[in-house]
Every structure is written in structure tokens, then in C-alpha cells.
Image (cartoon, coloured by chain):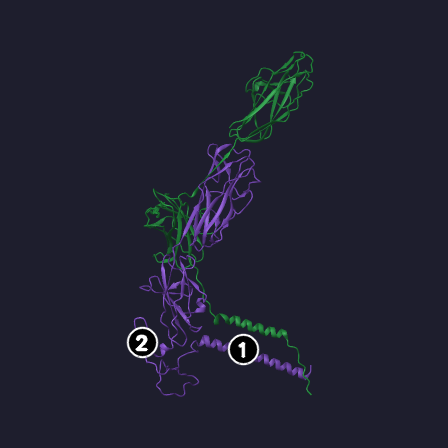
Chain colours: A purple, B green
Amino acid sequence: MSKHKLKYQNIKKCINKLVIYNLALVINLFVYSFIFLPNALGSEPSSTNFKIESYSFGGGGMSGGSSTNFKLNGVLGEVESGQISSTNFKSGNGLSFLQTVNVPPAPTFTNPSNYYNKLSITLNNGGNPTDTKFAIAISPDAFVSTTKYVQSDDTIGSSAVWQTNTVWGSSGFTIIGLTPGTTYTVKVSAMQGNFTQSAYGPTASAATINPTLSFSLSTNSLNIGTLTPGTVVSSSTVTTTISTNGTGGAGIYAYDNNSGLLSNSTGSTITSSTSNLGSVTSGYGLQGTSVTQSSGGPMEIDSPFNVSSNNVGILNTTKQLVFDSTNAPVTSGQGVFVLKAEASSTTKEATDYADTLTIIAAATF
Amino acid sequence: MVNLSITKLNKQKLFNSLSVLILLAGMLEPFIFPVKTDATATTGFFRPDRMVVSLNDSGGVICLTPQTTGTEGKVVVTFPGNGTQGSASYGVDTTVGHWTTDTTATNLPQGVTGWPSIGANATSVSGAAVTIASGDLTVNTQYCFHFTTSGANGLQTPTGANSSLTGTIQTQTAGGAAIDTVNFATASLSNDQIAVTATVPSTFSFSLGSNTAAIGTINTTGATSATAITATVSTNANNGWIAWAKSANAALNSASTGDTIPSAAYVNNNSSNIVNLSSAAGYVLDVQTGTNSPTIATSYAGNGSTSGGNFDTHFEQLASQTAPASGSTFTMAVRARASATNKAATDYSDTVTVNAAGQF
């Protein structure tokens, strides 16, 4: 290797080492600044035993406004302290008021989807720096007697929690754990490194609604008809309709009395089973045929009823989930089903084969 | 002149350096941009066993997925309304012993955990609120229990059909401090059942395998038999079927000679009707059972080779079953033996009529 080539490579090694050393230095400074010396940036002028809390200047100039470890922050011509106010306005005076953060405007506070235990909120930064932190006060009685605060996990608690708009969720977030049927009022205060906390800003209100569930059946009687041996017969359709704002969605269940079609006069039962009626000599069961919804969900057909052709799911005395809204609120969710049956050549003749199907619904809140 | 040889940039080393920088940046990112963690709300539901109005002694399932850490000691279920049955209010029985719980798997939704140490009965009832002892619960686990009610009223559903009837499920410490609360909604219907009906019509089929039984040349020393004819019966009659037969002549008659090979006198429903042609002349019918083992009448249950029952000119029972049958069979073999004095002829004949019916 030539002498020059070798020298170049050595130079390159040195440069690489310098880059790494500098990077480590930056990291150390950063960690030191934010973890070990949280007040390293933006602290009041202070020494070991003394700190300048507030100050003002006269009309004269000054010299030596800063040194290695101290700096002065002051204004000229301001009223020393106090507050001038009227019914609808107030003027904050003095250095602290002059340099306090902007009072945050009212947040956007809504119930966008018929929530019963949460509300949506979007903070307004109010022109404050991006590292400004905000606390959100919330009350079910417009702060007449109750003041709570939104916590870092979006629940409400007794102590104020300060977070930047980014941490809260600058695109908005939901406050959870609220009481149904209640109007909530919120207001926001801001605080930023060098300056004092602002007053709470104007309020905004929104209301939770109550949990909702509605359910209906399209019919209360179903005649399957004449069961000719060896022929699969379908009933007409039954439509179930459900709406709920339950966050976990709705479920529609079915169960019957006899686990089959029973003839009391002969004691004969066409037993229900999960099967392909086209492949067995006799049977009876339920088949989900379609699902729809106006919004939310979507509705779905649950196994073993999500079949087609001559296939059916078993009916018995155990409540079985037939339709659900996929763990989400749903409006006018519909599940449609039919009953199918087949008699064998030895199924006793009778006109009184019967069953009682019970359909119930529930929603997770 | 100094010659410099510039080597190519080592791409691998550059990649390694950049990788280290990216890794360090990723490690520091949570400290620079801390994110908040979102809590999950407590969920639960009430699934009634019935939703129909004006029902006494109803029951249901209570489920809860707790999210708050605590030591549960009781669960309080507050049903919609004020505890007195009304158009939009459940009636809540105040007798604690009328409330019974269980965690039987078939009574609970699939995949849930039975509520630990749920009290067998309620411990108190106040208004619409029923309190039941509870064991400690683990956050994020879905627990359920089923309950039934008894007594004159039990849990009464509202008298009116309604949507969005609201109640609460709340877990508490043993001292009564609230831990988790769920507000639920349910509904009541004028009718939550569907009456299903169907008809199975009567069916019956009967067939003979052949309509001729050629006995052939009859001798005077033993039985000569025609090929057995198979009868097949299918029916869904609740009480099964019966088959009968009668002979036109109760004998083989020769028109040309006027002679006859008679059956002996018929003995009803009795094995005495059986004649063994090995030792006597005569004309008989031997019936044997087949598929599904129909019962053969004793009057015609021959030995399958030389004997059989005497014919009658009236319908007499051959075979039967007492339940629906599909493809049941029996066989009929006509046998004859001439006497020494029977005139020679080629036209000895008879007509046997066989029928069957389902017993509906």
C-alpha cells in the first residue's frame, strides 16, 4: 500500500472517531440537560443561595445584563403589579402577566357518535409555543361545586395533569369513564417553561347520552309446511332488527324448547342438528341468510348458522349467538334467518309437529 | 509531485455508522417525545333469559370486564326502574333467597370466565338494586354469572314494550366502595318467541315381487313349492302396518277335471293351522320374515321348506309391524302335495290376493 494511501486511511479513521466522540458528547449533553438538570434551560436567574423572582427597571439603561451563569429578563414602563378589571374585561399588569402564556381558547368539545360514557375534545393551542403544557378541568355541574381533571389516561381524577398538546393528542381524543345522560363542561389552562400558569380559558360543554338498545322480531309464528319424506323444506324468512350505542356491540341469540320439532300426539321428534339436510334422512335447524345495517357494525352471521344451501345450525335449549355487530355500535342492524326441516320415510305422520323459538338480544356497554 | 490514491468510500462502514445513529435515535425518541397511555373503559352487559313483557321469575346473565384494580367483595345489579313492576320498570323481588346464581357453562356465553365466588343467593335487595357477594376479580378478564329467580314474583319484566331500559352493574369492595361501574341498556318485547309448526303427511307403499307362483308338477310323496314371492312395505304410520291374504278357492282347482287339492280347514291365529306336507297332502302358504324382521302370523309361519298354513277364502293376517317402517319385507311360498286319488290335469290353479295397510 502506498504511503499516501495509508495516510488517507488513517485520516479517515480519525474523522470517524471524531464523529462518534461528538455524537456521544451531544447525547450526554442532551441527557444531562433533560434528565439531570430539568431546570437547566429556561431557569430564573439564580445562584446557590439567591434567586431573582421578579424585577423591573426604571428609565435608565443597564449594563452587564448577563454573564456566564446569570441573565436578566425585564421590561420598562409597566405597572409594578395589580389587576385592572371591569365586569367583562381585566388587564393583567406587571412582568408576570406580561409574559404569561396565552390563555387557551375554549376547546372543541363534542359527542360525535351518541356516546354514553365518553366525549371528544380537541385542544386549541392559543398561539402558545409547542412546548406549552395544558391542564383540562372538567365538571358535571359547570364547576358550581365539582371540579375534576382529565388524567393522562383520559379518565377523570382529582389532580390536574399537565401535558403538551401533542401528548394529549393534537388531533383530538376522547375523555372516558363519564356518566351517561350528563352535560359536562371543560376549560383549559396553559403553562410554559419560563412563565406562570395562565388562567383557565373559556368553557365548552357537551353531553353524554344514555345507553340505548332496541330490538324487534318481524314475526312471532312460522309454519314450515308439509314435510314430504326426503325433501328439505324451508320456512319463510324471519328478520331481527337491533340498534345500540354499546361500545362492544350487540348480539342476537336463539334457543328452542324441544331441540327439534316435536309431535305431542305421536311423541315423535325431528331432532335438530348441525348438518347438511341433503345428506341425512331427517333433521331441523336454523340458517342465517343475510345481514345488513344502516350504519355501524357491520352485522355478521355466527357459526354454525353462517351456512348455505341445505346446511343448518343446531337449535337446542342453550342460548346460541346467531348474529352480532362485530363488537361495534350499530344502527338498524338486521339479521335474517330461515328454518329448514326434512322428514324421513319413517317420521311418524302427524299434523302437530311444533317448536318454540325464543330470540333475545343484549349489547355490551 | 505527490500522488494521492483516493480509495473508494467503504459503503459497508458507512452503513454501519448510519445504523448505529438510527438505533441511538430510536432509543432516545421516547424520552424526547413521550406519549400518553390510554385507559380502557370497563365493559359489561345484562342478557335476559326472556325479553317478553309481564313475565314473573325471569332470569339472565350478568357479565363484567373490570378495568380498575381493587378487591371486589360484592356486585350490585340495579335493574331498570324503581324495583316495582311497571310499564318501564322491572319488579325486583326483595326476598334474597329468591335470587339464585350459577356459573354453569351452558348458561353462560361462550369463552367467558365464571364469576369467582359469586354468592349463591343475594345478600340484600333495596329498590331495584340487588347485592350479591363476589370474589376478587382480575382486570381485563370477562366474568359472567347466571341468575334465576323464584317465588311469586321473582324478577318481573316490565308490563310494557320498551327500548333502552337502563340499569347498572357495579362492583364494590366489601366495605361498599365502588370499583367498576357499567351502565347497560336492555329492552322488553310484547313477544320474544316464534311458534314453529310443521306437518308430516301419511305415507304408505306396498309391492309384490311377482304375481305368479308356479308350483310345477305336484307329486304325492312330498311338498312341491313355488318360488317364494317377496312383499315390501314402507309406511310412517304411527302404529305400523298389517298384511293379509285370502285364497279364492282355499284349494287348487282343476277346471278340466273338476278335481281339487284343498287346504285343510283354516285355524285362526294358531300354529294348528300349519300342515307339514311331508306327511300329508294339502295346499298351504308358508310366510317367512325378511328385512326389518316383521312379525309373522303363527297361522302361516311354516318351516321354510315343507310346511305352511292352510288358506282361507277370507283375508287372514300374514305379517305385521307396530312402528313406522321403511322397506320391510316378508316372503310367501305356496306349497302343495297331491293325494293318490287326485286326477291328472295341467290346470290346477288358485288366485291368492295379498294386501296391506298402515295403522295410522
Task: Name the residue that disc number 1 marks.
Answer: A23
Task: Give the Cα separation between the discs numbered 2 and 1.
Answer: 50 Å
| Label 1: few (<14), some (14–19) or many (≥20) C-alpha neighbours in 10 Å | some
Judge by depth and name the residue closer to the eye, A79 or B123: A79
Left or right: B17 as drawn, with respect to B191: right
Whether residue B70 is visible here, answered yes or no, is yes
| Label 2: element kind | strand
Judge by depth and name the residue closer to the eye, A72 or B94: A72
Asked where in the image residue A56 lies, by quadrant, the reply is bottom left
Badges 2 and 1, same chain: yes
Q: Position of residue B84 (x, y in %)?
A: 32, 47
Count all numbered tags in the image, as a single digit. 2
The mark closer to the camera, 2 or 1, is 2
Task: Name the residue that disc number 2 marks.
Answer: A83
Task: Tell me the amino acid under the disc marked 1.
Answer: Leu
Task: Tell me the amino acid under the disc marked 2.
Answer: Gln
Tell me which numbered mark, 2 or 1, is placed earlier along the sequence.
1
